[in-house]
Amino acid sequence: MVKLSVIIPAFNEDRTIRNVVQAVRTSVQIEKEIIIVNDGSTDRTFEILEDLRRDPEIKVIHQQQNRGKGYAIRLGLSQAAGEYVVIQDADMEVDPSDLPAILKPLLDKSSQIVYGSRFINGRNNSTLVSYIANYLLAHLVNLLYNTRITDESTGYKAFTSSLIKSVDLQCEGFEFCAEVTAKVLQMQHHIHEVPISYFPRKKNEGKKLRFWRDGLTAVWILIKYRFKRTHYNE
């Protein structure tokens, strides 16, 4: 029987983390482990996770200092034991009910990488500015790496465990998305996309991505790794 590892990096997500975990637990009926990395939260996330960790499906890793989403994902990957890995945001902007559709191409062996695309069918609740920026970022990926994707920075990314663990990730923060996209494409893998729901939150609701700063970082990462030799982990 296959096993799924769901990695949830969390920083100050006490308003949503319990709902996310519950939704993930009920969305797919295969054996799974939910690995939650508390990235130095200063709200009630610690207390909530201490309560949730009584569930045998749930592993909790607490970090005293905030290191960033990329570092939290790398830490989660080091503990992942499943044949498949899903990166799940802790903010409920993407809906865990989409997990079966995301996993299907992995389970039927038609792909080793699946991205849940928020924009494959249009704006999907996104603001016009956000939609245009994400469109331009995806277009840059397609131009640099000769591929066709619609959502580079999606909060839903799924991989075979053997593939994602072969990627030499160096990321600390939100540049995880750009780095992993660049490196798997450099390795000549195809990214399969499936449509997902999207419910964006605002800055005053806890959104942490800083659009222009993190967007420019993503552009730099995509360009840098296009012209840098990809490394593999042994």
Image (cartoon, helix red, strand yellow):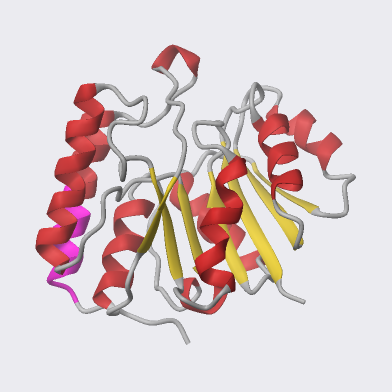
Where is residue 18 drawn, in percent x and y?
73, 31
| Residue found 66% across the figure and 36% down from its top | 20
Q: Does the magenta stretch include residue 138?
A: no
Q: In this view, does 103 lie above or below 48?
A: below
Q: Which residue appears farthest toward the bottom when viewing the image?
A: 234
* Whether residue 160 is visible: no
Q: Which of 186 and 114 is in front in this view?
A: 114
Find out whether residue 221 is within the magenta segment.
yes
Predominant secondary structure in magenta? helix
Counting from the top left corner in percent of width and height, residue 39 is at 58, 41
Locate the N terminus by quadrant.
bottom right
* 150 displayed left or right of 232: left
Badge count: 0
Residue 30 is situated, as x and y percent measured from the top left of the image, at 75, 62
**Observer-nearest of 19 and 97:** 97
The magenta span reads 219-228
Viewer-closest of 108 and 87: 108
Left or right, 159 with respect to 77, comes to left
Residue 125 to residue 120: above or below: above
Q: Position of residue 162 (x, y in %)?
A: 53, 79
Q: Which residue is drawn at 50% across and 68% down?
A: 105
- Is residue 27 among the parts visible in the rendering? yes
In the image: residue 75, left or right of residue 48 = left
**Which residue occupies the foreground of this view, 33 or 224?**
33
- The reply, left or right, for residue 146 in relation to residue 69 is left
Relative to 67, is 199 above or below?
Answer: above
